[in-house]
Amino acid sequence: MKGTYLGEFEELVLLTVGILYDDAYGLAIVDELEKQTGRNTMISVVHKSLVRLEEKGYLRSRMGGATETRGGREKRLYTLTAAGTKVLNQSRDMRNTMWKQVPRVVWDGGKL
Amino acid sequence: MKQGNPPRWAVAFFRWFCNDHLADAVLGDLLEMYDRRRATLGKFKADLLFILNVVQFIQPFAIQKRSTTPINTFGMVSNYFKVARRNMAKNKMYTAITIGGFSVGLATCMLIFLFIKNELSYDKHYKEGARIFRLYNHFEGPDEQKWANIQPAFAGVVKEEIPEVELAARLTQMRLRPSSLVRLEDNPENSFEEMLTFADPEILEIMETPMVFGDAKKALKDPQTVVLSRRKAIQYFGDTNPIGKVLIFNDEKSRPYTVGGVIEDFSTLSHFQYDFILSLTGMEFWPGEQTSWCCWNYTTYFRLREGANPKAVEEKMLSIRDTYLVGYMTEMGSQDVEETKLYHKYKLQPVKDIWLQSEIGDPLKHGSMTYVWLFGGIAIFILLLACINFINLSTARSANRAKEVGLRKVVGSLRKYLIAQFLAESTLYSLISFAIAIALVYAALPAFNHISGRTLTIPLTEWWLFPVIVLASLFIGILAGLYPSFYLSAFKPIDVIKGKLSRASRNSALRSGMVVFQFATSIMLIIGTFVVYQQMTFLMNREVGFDKDQLMIIEGASTLGASRESFRNELLQLPEVENVSISGFIPVAGMNREGYPFFKEGRSKIDKAVGGQKWRVDPSYISTMKMKVVDGRDFNRHLASDSHAIVINQTMARQLGLKEPVGQKITNDVETWEVIGVVEDFNYTNMKNPISPLSLIIERGGETAVSVRLKSSDIAGAIQSVNTVWNKFMPNQPIRFSFLDEKFARMYDDVLRMGQIFAIFATLAIMIACLGLFALSSFMIEQRRKEISIRLVLGAPVATIFKLLTGNFLKLVLVAFVIGAPLAWYGMNQWLQNFEYRAPVTSQIFMGAGLIAISIAIVTVSYQSIKAAMTKPVENLRET
């Protein structure tokens, strides 16, 4: 199924939502991504992938946590769904399996 | 907020394009970022970055609407229709009036659509249509004139000198018009035929006539050949191939015609309609005729070569004019040479324009662009009237729907859904009306065909019919429903449910305006009807300068030959016959005509010519026609010198500048006559034109008809007696006669037709307007029931109540009259300009139309008013 494919950036966003746990909203995710990866991400890109991930069912959202700096506007707070944690696990498992299959000699810098 | 804000327009812009799901959250994020940046980067940079961020969000994911709860569209739409149906059933009268008015309006539009489509599709069927032209003369001088008759030699010269002309063919109806006798070689019984013409052989190729028998290229090649239409071939020869058989025309046994081919009947959508085409090959009507430049007797058609430019051909024809026509005129010493060089042009008319361009003089039947516009305009107006009924009734009754609107809004309906609901409702009305309208068209088509003189059919087999009807009904439904739906959906739930919305609904100014529009249209059409009929009566009863009643005309009399005088004498023996004259030159359209330039004797090379008619008559012509001799004397049968005498009409005397006409000599450059009398001007053409110069001479060659003045009141008996005499002389030719007054009336068929059309549309318009007024008034009165009852209780007499209720509507009709009457006056005056002789447009017409409109309106409104004024007040006041 097309919807189950997870892009690299999407995986990062999902992980960030997990890290932020209770306060994962657009701007916080941008900040956290910069902190973790050093990438400066555009806010529109983050929102776009949040919308996609919610459509795919890996995230769910609610409104809440208005502050004065936001002009009294509420945040859209995202949390991982069961499907979200599952797809992250799958992704990690797949990597691990693949890691294990790489012959040791590769890591040792051996030549053919 | 701590410090400053981003540009307000950027925020508004973002709110506008972003969907509800993200708008608040993202805007919050952006503002948070803005605050941070403002602190570090300053306001200007922060503003710029904010705008940049907003622009970055212009992406599908932010714009697309995401509905969290999907709407059950099907359920909702079916609910709309259910409510619409219940509303229709609840107010049966309003429903019937709306649908009735709508269907009548739509049926009218459909008929007119069929008519216009028919008019615009004439002569579109030729494969090479773009290359087929008819030649016409355009005199661009002071009295501009266009006519289609060309000199006999023209086509031949063009074929030799202008290479762009691929085919050229001429037509003439000389000796064949208005009708001819046709018979088989071995059968002496003649029949009358009217659709005959002489033509060059190429005409079959140019007109692309499909052949049933024979070859288009050869059928008319030989002299004395004829081509028949399929229907006539069947009539004369049955189902066999008639090629090689022989037909005799006008009993001229010495000139038999051999059938060279049979063509398919011409399409009814063709201007070109002939049943017999006689070959012009080897034909010469008088010695030297075919190469002469004297006379204008031929219609000429061209087919140009592919890619040829008609303008270039027109240019080249100018040089032909200068060499040949001007050459001929100079040779004859004409005074008009300079004028001809300056103003006379030969032009090409595309074949597809012939039907609708009736301003080029020719003897063909034409449609009229004026009718197309007039009909189209009327169609739109009638449709508007029907739409107005719908708009008026639905807004007037808005109070009844207000609660529904309020409740729908309270339970969460958006305005656009309400608009959709009301549009769906009006579309439903329009769909039902369309179905009824189609039935009406079906029923009315025969009558419409009779009046319009066409053969229209509903194009049931055309693929586009069904989609067009569905699209049109949707369009009309939306057109009529647009205003009501916006009006109704705008109610505020709170006002409605509190009952604040005044019961006598608002917006009566608009409604009044629409009633005024409806009645102004009706009044205009009524006035139009009156003026047309008045003009018709005026034309019929006007003194025309001769007595057109009780004059019997026997046509096809040329076959009498030498026995015509004894025929005349036997007729004179009959007690029913007062006088008899032998001449085909009769003062009504469709009879013989012969025009010449006239001069005073000896001045033909000096003066300008006076174009006039020369009618060949017999000595009893003036007395039979009962024309009035105002100067000099009538012809005398016993004076041999009268063979050089001429009687002229007053216009001829005036235009030739003859102060004392009697005794003067005039000439047409061929012969010279002495004027013995002046006859009072009489109308011999359609009264759209002024009387032109005319002269009468005693000369042979015009004996195609016999006029019989009857004196008996027993017309049927007189016809019987005349017929007996005719059969004695012409046993093999059925008598064909008509009466002059009937022929005269037929000249004004188009006026009569116009009158009928006006009358029908006026009736329809006033009917629709009255339906609307009736419904509107009954609704208004229903709204004021309590008020009326209280007035009655307080002692108002019934008459006062009646006045109160009808007064308002009367005012509207009066305003409509004030608007409609001047417009109608202007329009009808324009129409009357077509006539040289016109009945004055009197104030009685306007009074009459106004009275009719007002009395119809009063009758319409008063039924409900009286009913309201007569009900017992208790009944209305008792209920809550």
Image (cartoon, rainbow, N blue to C red):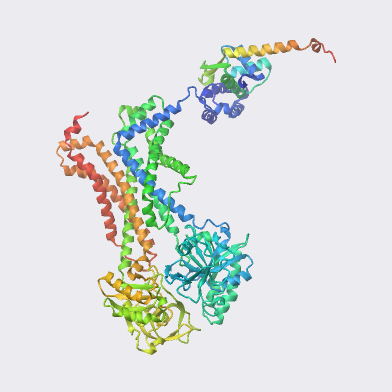
Determine the residue positioned at 37% across, 34% down. B488
Query: Depth check: B33 or B270 in front?
Result: B270
* Direction from residue B612 to residue B535 in the image, left or right: left
Residue A85, picture quadrant: top right
Residue at the spot x=24%, y=48% of the render?
B858
Residue B338 screen position, x and y as percent: 54, 76
In the rendered view, tell whether residue B51 sits above or below residue B745. Answer: above
Q: Residue furthest left?
A: B795
Report the residue that reaches farthest toward the right: A112
Q: Position of residue B8 (x, y in %)?
A: 53, 29
Q: Position of residue B501 (x, y in %)?
A: 31, 32
Q: Is residue B622 depicted above or below B299 in this figure?
A: below
View extreme (front): residue: B186
The reply to whether residue B32 is in sight is no
Q: How many marks?
A: 0
Above or below — where is B717 with respect to B68? Answer: below
Image quarter in which the C terminus of chain A is found: top right
B396 with respect to B656 (left or right): left
Can you give x and y, in whole percent of width and height, for residue B558 in the image? 42, 76
Camera-side residue: B216 or B51?
B216
Visible in this render: residue B538?
yes
Which residue shows up at 43% across the image and 77% down it? B612
* Residue B850 falls left or right of residue B874: right
Q: Nearer the viewer, residue B623 or B514?
A: B623
Quadrant holding the N terminus of chain A: top right
Residue toward you, B297 or B219: B219
